[in-house]
Structure formats: structure tokens, C-alpha cells
Image: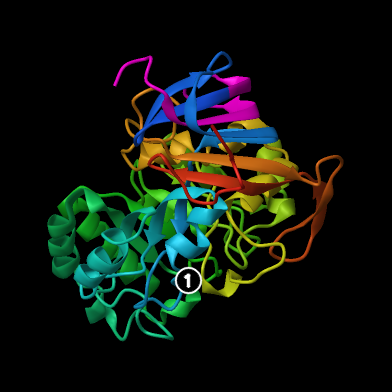
Amino acid sequence: MTDSTPYDLLIGAARVRCAATGLDGPGAVAVRGERIAAAGPAVNGPARTRLDFPGGLLLPGLVDLHAHPARGGSRYGIDPDEHLLPRGVTTVLSQGDAGAGNWPAYRDRVIGAARTRVRLAIHLSRRGESDPDCPYGSLDDADVAACAAAIEDGGELIWGIAVNTGASIGIDPRAVLDRALQAAERTGRPLLFGTRMQSDWPLDEQLPLLRAGDVVTYCFNPLAEGVVRGGRVRECVREARRRGVLFDVGHGMISFSFPVAEAALGEGFWPDTISSDQYRRHVGSRPQHDLALTVSKVIAAGMPEAEAFRRATLRPAELLGLDGEIGALRPGMCADLTVLERSPVDGAETLRDAGGVERSGTRWVPRLTVRAGRVVADPAPERL
């Protein structure tokens, strides 16, 4: 291919934004094959397909660091190609939908077969989330050796280990975290950690156990042992961040509170990543819960827009070790792209947190997804 070869796809938008390159203004992204050929304000030329979004925001494909892509075998699972990819998410990390016992099936049915790029934070329980009630029948299910063997088998497809110590696990949360850390040390992998949010195990005792690179999810939850207490970010949280522990939103059904997010953001405590924790109970929600809506809420809570989009594109790509491939609009990178538009076009609408608290803000909605150069949702493009 030469520079005179027509582009396969050319997408223009009112704003092209890339945290890695500093792009933020009117422009276009050109694609040849599966790769970005050019991006910026002066990009133009003949193209087999041209799409223009005069009210759109063109970004690298969204990266959701905590959701539940699955095709059977998980009580939380949603088909990523049906529920995530059309919503602008081109890459997603599964929070524990499979464990060592069902890892081979997950690899074949989901990672290997989905158009969406999927990585796994493998469940410490060898059963994963296959049981309809609880991942642990007993502590024996927290099988360190089996988890480590699955990670060795999975290689780069398994990013880390998912461990949730919430009340629903039904067994000793301290023992579960201890075994997760054993498996993490044995394999050199990080944890995606759902803290114990109840007062029977203080956060002050949990966070010192974590290591640099471990990710605490559900960071804006309103429960007893959360990041914010008495309207202030807790010192144990700040100390953990100083040691390199990372913090992720993980909205889900209960883990995003406007008052908590506003208190944290107001003190300059910004999440490292913004994730949706989108799963089965969100199917058919109105408005549809997705990563773009979660980003919209974080912006409404006070995070600068540019920083919020960085934490749903470049930053999670970096944490997944994929920043040489995705998360930016550089020539040669995979052509994973997302176009968002404001709803409504002018003004603001009511956004609600997990507890029903309301704030006014812009809701960003997915308009187009491109995965590896192929349009996922085609809005009747002009064909040249």
C-alpha cells in the first residue's frame, strides 16, 4: 500500500480526541485494512467508505477494565458482541467470569470467538461464576495451584486474578484474599480486587495487603468501608495510592455514588480507570447502562472531560499491556474507534447514580464502533 492508495474508511468528526497524541479538535481518522493510516485535522482523501459526524466525538475504541463478557458459564455474563461492542467498547476485561475449571471453555467460546477483544481476570475460584448463587462452595475452591496453572496456560490472554471479598462469597474473606495473593505472587499477575465493604473487615486492614499494580474496583461505592468517610478520602486510601495501588470505578448496580465521587474528585482523588461493571441485570435498562454512560456520570461528578476519556481509553490499555496496539490514534495502531454524540445535543439531562441520586449533565451515547477497521454499526454511510 502507498500513500496514494484510497483509504478503506475515512471518518470525520467535529472533535477527534486522543490522550496519547494530544489531538482535540475537528478532524478525521483514516483506515487501511485493520490499521490506522492517519489521524488529525488535515486528514482527507479518497476513501471506499466515508462517514461524517458533524456533532460527534471520535475516540480510540473504549476499553472497559471491568465488565462481564461471557457466552454461558457465568451468572453475570453478557455476549460482548451484542451488548458491549455496539456500545463503543472494543476491548473488555472480564472480572472473573471463568476460573481454572472452565477456563478452556471460556477461551474457546469467548476470547477466541468474539469480535470484541476480550481479556480475563481469572476468578480465584476454580468454578468462576458458573454457580447461580456463589462462586465458593468451600475454601477448597480457592485453589492456588489450579489458578496458577490456568494462568500459565492462558499466557497474555489472562491479565490477572479477580478476587471479590464482598458478603456474597459466604466464606472467610481474609483467607480468600490471602490465597489470591499467593496465586498472584506465584504468577507475577496483578489482582482486580473487590474490597469487603462491610464493617467486619476495615478497609484500613485490607489495603495494606495489596501491592503496586493491584487494582481496587468499586472505588466510588457508598458502603461502610469505602474510599470516602465523613466526606473525606481516607488516609489508608491515599497511602495505598502512594504505594502504587490503582483505583477503578466499576459502576455496576450499587457501586457508583455521586456524593462519594464528588467528595473524592473534589480532593483531587481521580480514579485510574473508569469501568462499567456491565452485566446481565443491565440488559434492557433505560437509559442503557454502558461505559459511555459511566464516563458521563464521572464527568458530571466533577472530573475534567479530557481526563475522564483518558481513563476509558489510553489508561486501561496501558494497564492491560496493550497500549502499543490500542488506546490511541497513532498510525499503525489497530483501527479500534468509537464515535460518541451528546444526548441531548444542546443542554443537559438528568443522570442518576446507583442509589437514585440525580445530577444534571451531558449523556454521551455511542453512535459508531469500528473494530479492527470494520464498522460494527453502520449509520447509512456515504459511499464514494
Choose between 381 and 16: the one closer to the eye: 381
x then y, percent, for residue 297:
69, 49
Q: Residue at x 44, y 48 (%)?
A: 90
Q: Residue at x 61, y 53 (%)?
A: 220
Where's the C terminus, which quadrant?
top right
**Horizontal arrangement in the rendering, residue 144 relative to residue 199 (left or right):** left
Q: Position of residue 58 (x, y in %)?
A: 58, 33
Please tell me which residue is depicted at 67% across the width and 39% down the height of the picture. Answer: 265
| Amino acid type, residue under disc 1 in the picture | Gly
Within 10 angstroms of label 1, few (less than 14), some, or many (20 or more) residues?
some
> Is residue 129 shown in magenta?
no
Does the segment drawn in magenta span residue 25? yes
Residue 230, visible in the rendered structure: no
Residue 284 vs residue 29: left or right?
right
Q: Position of residue 301 (x, y in %)?
A: 73, 44
The residue indicated by pointer 1 is 166
* Circle 1 SS class: loop
Range covered by the magenta-colored residues = 1-27
Q: Quadrant of the N terminus?
A: top left
Is residue 86 visible in the rendered image? The answer is yes
